[in-house]
Amino acid sequence: MYPSSTTHQRVPSFFLDGDGTRDKPCVIGDASGVHGYVLAHDATTKETQICLNTNTIKERGKDLLPILRRELAKRQVNSKTLEDLGFNLGFVGYFGYGMRSQTRDYEPVPFIQQCQKVPDAAMLFSDRSLVLTDDGRALVLELVENNTSSTDGFVRMAQDALFQAIQKKKTKQRLPTENNELVFTSYLDEHKYSKLANEALERIAAGDSYEICLTTNFEARIRDVDPWLYYKRLRSANPAPRASFIDLRSACGVALCSSSPERFISLQPSGFVEAKPIKGTSPRIHENVDADRASAEELASSIKTRAENLMIADLLRNDLLRVCDHAHVSKLAAIESFATVHQLVTTLEGQLKSEHDAIDLIFNTFPPGSMTGAPKRRTCDIIAQLESQERGPYAGTFGFIGLDGRADLSVVIRSALFSSSDADEYSRITVGAGGALTALSDIHDEWQELLLKANAVIMALGGRIDLSSSAGEKKKLLFPSTKPVPRTTMSKKEQRRRSNSLYSR
């Protein structure tokens, strides 16, 4: 079903790049143990590929979430001594946006063409991991049968790896790019985006949606790539609280580097639930403190972005109350600043009902409302009609579902997907970016925000954007552009007309 090139010999592995606290655990792990394996799922065909070392098993005709519940039930672990670590082994990986077809907010829509098929979901079952804590400890976790011990010296391997990491000097490694340039292209330029955005605004004015998140992908091709090197570069240039990495190329042909700042949903063993959607972005201006502060203040005072936060807060509260006894907003539209951008973040909290678990929580809240718009189900249908490419992992979630009932999933943004094919010597790097459209949106500003988000990742990878093939122009349009792009926007009168039309319904 999916490529697994023999050139990628690295054991399926992951890195949860936290600060070592229970809220953001720092974990390194793989699927090389006796109980480790990889799941790759196609949401359209409902085929699950299970990779167990050199063996591959396929299950057909089943949704993924029930399979995960079945597998978790086989290996449930409740250890009070591990509660403070924030991680207790389990599934680590991503649910792509296409997994929406197996969740509550879904109605069948026309098939969207995907240029290179990648798994809609890919999960590694980690039966052994190394957890680094904020007080300087390193703990080895391994899943073994009752009254047995590790059989292949994993503890010694972990000790040796830590010692080598401490002794190794920090050296800058040159990233392998052809002609010293990594060029990303997209099927959209501003003119094509404006056409789609105007269609979206017409749907909003007609009362079909309050907010529509319109996205696109930027892609580049490269030979002899090591995603881990790119992740380290992304981590250095664009540090984020939900950053993580997973390499499943040897099992299903994909690796994902994420510098996401956004928590989709987290669940504690006690049943405490937290969601932190992001709505609203403005650039950091590090060379001028006053200008940087002004950028944050302008974002905080924006009527449009505060309205977006209100909408996503209402949407998520509705989603949470399907499985929670209560859900409330503890912070609304608070400024949080990251390396390259300021963002408005809303925090919601709830208490999961005792009869529900992490799988129920995902089923009732996926996909992330911050990447769809509101109302979610109708807006997802509109997005499917507007966007001509599947989003892949982008706009989905990335994180873990633990053996102790815990789960922590981020929204897949500020990320790069590396995908390969057995028949192609090149790897494809895909970076997704998008933004929410409302009745008050300025299309030119929305396009510039989309480029800002994409460029934060692409520049960190050492690449650049070239939109010449999208625009069909002889002269290349690069970002940042050397020429001003024609401005496409609405008059203030038209903004008021659309706003009045929307809110009078």
Image: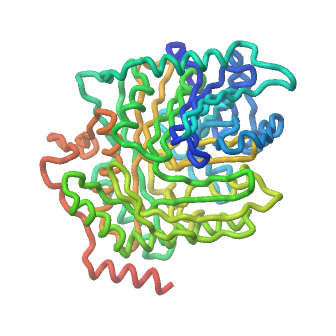
In this rendering, position of residue 412 left or right of residue 105? left
Residue placed most toward the observer, 62 or 315: 315
Q: Position of residue 166 (x, y in %)?
A: 46, 22
Residue 196 appearing in the image: no
Residue 251, image quadrant: top right
Give the position of the N terminus as an image quadrant.
top right
Residue placed most toward the observer, 136 or 321: 136
Residue that appears at 30% across and 79% down: 494
Residue that appears at 31% across and 37% down: 184
Residue that appears at 76% across and 52% down: 357
Q: Is residue 450 above or below residue 247?
A: below
Counting every numbered tag in the picture gives 0
Q: Is residue 233 above or below residue 200?
A: above
Residue 61, image quadrant: top right
Residue farthest left in this picture: 483
Residue placed most toward the observer, 148 or 251: 148
Residue 461, image quadrant: top left
Residue that appears at 42% across and 18% down: 168
Residue farthest front in this picture: 135
Q: Position of residue 12 (x, y in %)?
A: 59, 24
Residue farthest bottom in this picture: 504
Residue 410 appearing in the image: yes
Q: Position of residue 67 (x, y in %)?
A: 76, 39
Q: Position of residue 361 (x, y in %)?
A: 70, 55
